[in-house]
Image (cartoon, rainbow, N blue to C red):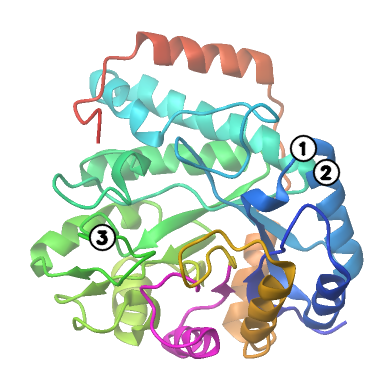
Amino acid sequence: MSQPKACILSVSGAQLTDGEKKLLARVNPWGVILMGRSCASVAQVTALTAEVCQVTGRQTLFFIDQEGGRVKRLKPPAWPDFPAPLSYLGLYKAEPELGREAVWLHHRLMAAELEPMGIRADCAPVVDILHAGMHKIVGDRALGDSADAVGDLAQAALAGLAAGGVAGVIKHIPGHGRAEVDSHETMPVVRASREQVSQDIAPFKLVRHATMGMTAHLAYRALDDETTPATHSRKIIQEVIRKEIGFDGLLMTDDLGMKALGGDLASRATRALEAGCDVILHCSGLDAWGKVLRDPEKVLREMSEVADVCPQLSGEQLRRAQAADAATGDVKPFDRAEGRARLEKLLSEAPPSATAGV
């Protein structure tokens, strides 16, 4: 069998359409990401992941955005709720060991929901630092407001996911915390000094061992120029992400459909691959007017446009993808009820975060 293509695609709903079956069989994407439109119940998601693997003929790696708080594709009442990652900062500042335990439990419990359904990759944790006065696109998705806190807690998050057989994806390299606008709508330009940007890079160094990472659709004046986002910047990918941070895992783009990137989908994907991204992520999440994209034909057209310009995995891309695959599925024993009770106890006793309300 030929190697899968260097892309992670989405699907339009709770079951595959005939067109999606044909495309997935032809393209064989390395991964598939599930959006909220594809998550109705445990039984339905389990059936969907099995169906995709049957169509592709291999154990395709499934991704999801499940952070807790406002970013979650699995929602109550079908799945339990989890607080925003920033909820643990007050506890961490008061009792670092308990803060790390709470973050580990948060992610271990999420993995316990994901892995049995066939989802073995989570686009978490957010390793961006919370900066006062910046756009709330990061906000309470951050684990903390300092490099040390974020890096420390991100390690706990990755460990919690891994104990449940799920690989984490660190994001958004080299740092999204200084964005003044929403990258879903336009490209943020970080005009901070090199010293300030180095602070944002610092927590990523502490989790550089992660098997997967996601780029930021932000331009950094101190790292390249004001017109080239990190996703399209060979200078940032090679000199900062690969060398300065020392990240040697699989590097994927943030969602290709975000308006921070100019041009059509095919050119966006091509530029990202040429810059040094290993895999293209395309969620088919929003249309040109910012509305959730649910039309199966539109989703299929977008998927086709992206997949057709992505090559088959080879060389270092393939090595990193295989390492990411190998980092999943090793589930350690865990009592879910005890874990949930312990997490709720820690949260009930935690002091409020100094950044509450962001």
Q: In the figure, residue 339 lies in which quadrant?
A: top right
Q: Which residue is mark 2?
A: 44
Residue 41, disc:
1
Q: Amino acid at mark 2?
A: Gln
Q: Amino acid at mark 1?
A: Ser
Whether residue 125 sits left or right of residue 229 in the image: it is: right
Name the secondary structure under disc 3. helix
Residue 201, disc:
3
Residue in view at x 32 percent, y 65 percent: 245
Residue 263: in magenta span: yes
Q: Earlier in the sequence, mark 3 or mark 2?
A: 2
Name the secondary structure under disc 1. loop
Residue in view at x 63 percent, y 39 percent: 74
Q: CA distance from mark 3 to mark 2?
A: 39 Å
Q: CA distance from mark 1 to mark 2?
A: 5 Å
Q: Nearer the viewer, mark 3 or mark 2?
A: 2
Tag 3–tag 2 contact (CB < 8 Å): no
Q: Amino acid at mark 3?
A: Ile
Magenta span of residues: 256-282
